[in-house]
Image (cartoon, rainbow, N blue to C red):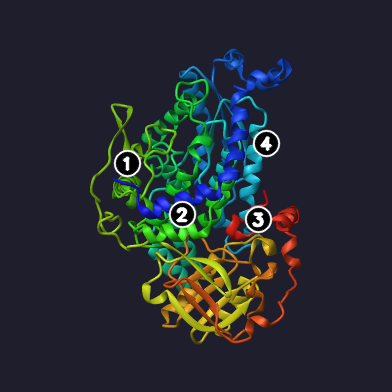
């Protein structure tokens, strides 16, 4: 099948736009690659320090022919998604020894849980933690004793930060090993209903707590299709996971076999192996286009409109939100996974999952088939699924048909003809909306604005019964320069209550929503942000605002409204407490959301 015209056009535009930055990046990688295995350039004293605690592996490490894997881990046992990583290093070390190599934990990176910090001050560190993770991984790998790398991470900012590090050390192969989703608990639609009932005062905190505990109940990734699971999808579409690895549950024999095989592949694709595949060769323009197509076809997290841009820039590739919009127009929505449907990722995986989708998208010419991957042989390998047969890990052809068309549709009969994300632009700036979960009749809202400078003000107005008619809720001064661009997911239940009462409701903000953004139309990531002189700083209560995802517009309709002076609230409370003092340098130097909201 020939490549889809839109995919071809966007790819050519990205290549042309990235010509200078990509060539500079590849020159740096080439110089590092030409220097050969890094350990060869260390003094005897340097090496002795690196090998001192390695016991029986010391002799192998001294030999230049033995590959050494650097493990960068985001393990902590507060994050359910990362708790399984506790046992991974020993599995990797054992697999490396059996393959004639070695492995060391190069270092750990921080991993915060947005579920814990949602609606709390700690959320103001969340986006910046991505850059911290990239920097921490850089420190870990700076010892220059590794021939390949394995990255252990799953959740929201962690995978993007690790990919940024992998791109920076692009002469080294990079294998990403997931932990998998927790088994299914309380259905996500029931959890959402109880959250709305609590917001409306219909049930007490005891009912809310029980629902939350029944939903988030064990080791593994949260089962809704938010940012964490969108990350896992991307790692397959971008060829950094082993085929079919993303959604295998923790604690299973297959999960362990995939971890062991991942370590073997990390050695096989090192410069000392037979299939040298450095990360820089995988992370090219075509791979990032494939990732965007996967995002659109699955209706993934809006957070990736920031993270993919930052990841790509680390590899010298320049993406633009216009690329996302063009590919969304060309890519059918094939999946309905909560919050875009009732199913969770376990149901999605059972229905055929990523293997079925990749096969369908390849057949339709919507993916570049010849990208390099850690598995070799191009992206077609990712239409296969792993199985254990007599204790041996093998890959077989995945299902050629969907096994549940309420969750997963073929490309010939998709849920929507276009993807799950829309770009909005107008006199209020440029933003994005996740439309895959928003009913078509709710994708255009024209109503008076209510303007707030923080989410707590919105909650107070709701409790006071102030929302009595159609409304566009403006929550401003939530951008990266103002307070680190926190997610405003805790607003979803109360705005959904208003919508369910029959009111037309939309949210407009320079902040973020969760990857689980739901059924309320939300124009988010608006640039320029209010603190950066953006038009949101000039909007007042009562101004007529039109949010139109159908036509991709975001406008204030009140004549003269945008001629006002910028409003500037007291933001001093954003600068201290819960560690925010330590992140002043990020707020001072961070770029716009449309450029990846990175300070690096």
- Closest to the camera, between mark 2 and mark 4, is 4
Left or right? Give the position of 14 relative to 119: left
- Residue at point 40% right, 66% down? 437
Structural crowding at the residue carrying mark 3, measured as other residues with C-alpha within 10 Å and reported as few (<14), some (14–19) or many (≥20): many
For label 1, the SS is helix
Residue 217 seen from this side: no
On the image, the x and y values in percent for residue 65 come to: 55, 15
Q: Cα distance, mark 3 to mark 4?
A: 20 Å
Q: Which residue is under mark 1?
A: 383
**Circles 3 and 2: CB atoms closer than 8 Å:** no
Identify residue for label 3: 125
Tag 2's secondary structure? loop
Q: Which of the two residues, 156 or 187, is positioned nearer the viewer here? A: 156
Contact, CB < 8 Å: mark 2 with mark 4? no
Q: Mark 2 points at which residue?
A: 216
Do labels 3 and 4 touch, CB within 8 Å?
no
Q: Looking at the image, do the residues carrying marks 3 and 1 touch, with CB atoms under 8 Å apart?
A: no
Write down the quadrant of residue 480 in the picture.
Answer: bottom right
Q: In front: 62, or 559?
A: 559
Q: Where is residue 146 in the image (x, y as percent from the top left)?
A: 59, 26
């Amino acid at each position: 099948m020939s490549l889809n015209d839109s995919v071809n056009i966007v790819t050519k535009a990205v290549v042309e736009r990235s010509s200078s930055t990509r060539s500079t990046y590849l020159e740096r990688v080439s110089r590092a690659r030409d220097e050969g295995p890094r350990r060869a350039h260390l003094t005897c004293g340097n090496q002795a320090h690196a090998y001192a605690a390695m016991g029986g592996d010391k002799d192998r490490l001294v030999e230049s022919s033995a590959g050494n894997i650097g493990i960068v881990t985001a393990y902590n046992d507060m994050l359910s998604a990362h708790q399984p990583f506790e046992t991974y290093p020993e599995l990797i070390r054992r697999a490396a020894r059996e393959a004639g190599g070695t492995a060391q934990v190069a270092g750990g990176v921080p991993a915060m849980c947005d579920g814990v910090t949602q609606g709390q001050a700690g959320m103001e560190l969340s986006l910046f933690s991505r850059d911290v993770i990239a920097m921490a991984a850089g420190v870990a790998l700076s010892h220059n004793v590794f021939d390949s790398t394995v990255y252990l991470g799953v959740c929201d900012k962690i995978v993007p930060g690790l990919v940024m590090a992998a791109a920076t050390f692009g002469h080294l192969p990079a294998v990403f090993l997931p932990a998998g989703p927790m088994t299914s608990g309380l259905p996500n639609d029931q959890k959402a209903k109880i959250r709305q009932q609590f917001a409306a005062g219909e049930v007490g905190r005891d009912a809310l707590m029980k629902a939350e505990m029944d939903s988030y109940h064990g080791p593994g990734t949260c089962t809704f299709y938010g940012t964490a699971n969108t990350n896992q999808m991307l790692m397959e579409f971008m060829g950094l996971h082993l085929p079919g690895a993303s959604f295998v549950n923790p604690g299973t024999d297959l999960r362990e076999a995939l971890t062991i095989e991942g370590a073997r592949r990390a050695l096989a694709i090192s410069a000392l192996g037979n299939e040298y595949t450095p990360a820089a060769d995988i992370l090219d323009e075509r791979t990032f286009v494939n990732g965007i197509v996967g995002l659109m076809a699955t209706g993934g997290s809006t957070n990736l409109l920031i993270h993919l841009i930052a990841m790509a820039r680390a590899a010298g590739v320049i993406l633009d939100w216009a690329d996302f919009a063009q590919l969304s127009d060309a890519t059918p929505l094939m999946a309905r996974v909560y919050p875009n449907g009732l199913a969770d990722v376990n149901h999605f995986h059972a229905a055929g999952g990523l293997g079925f989708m990749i096969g369908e998208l390849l057949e339709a010419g919507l993916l570049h088939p010849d990208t390099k991957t850690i598995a070799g042989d191009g992206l077609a390998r990712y239409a296969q699924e792993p199985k254990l047969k007599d204790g041996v890990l093998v890959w077989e052809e995945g299902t050629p048909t969907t096994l549940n068309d309420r969750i997963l549709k073929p490309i010939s009969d998709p849920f929507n003809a276009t993807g799950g994300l829309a770009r909005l632009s107008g006199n209020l700036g440029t933003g994005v909306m996740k439309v895959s979960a928003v009913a078509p009749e709710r994708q255009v809202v024209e109503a008076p604005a209510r303007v707030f400078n923080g989410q707590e003000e919105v909650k107070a107005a709701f409790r006071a019964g102030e929302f009595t008619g159609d409304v566009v809720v403006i929550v401003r001064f939530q951008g990266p320069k103002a307070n680190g661009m926190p997610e405003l997911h805790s607003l979803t239940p109360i705005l959904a209550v208003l919508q369910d009462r029959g009111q037309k409701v939309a949210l407009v903000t320079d902040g973020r929503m969760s990857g689980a953004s739901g059924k309320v139309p939300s124009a988010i990531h608006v640039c320029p942000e209010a603190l950066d002189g953006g038009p949101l700083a000039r909007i007042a209560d009562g101004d007529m605002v039109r949010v139109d995802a159908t036509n991709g517009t975001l406008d204030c309709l009140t004549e003269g409204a945008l001629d006002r002076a910028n409003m500037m609230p007291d933001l001093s409370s954003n600068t201290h407490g819960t560690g925010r003092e330590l992140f002043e340098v990020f707020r001072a130097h961070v770029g716009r959301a449309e450029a990846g909201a990175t300070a690096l």
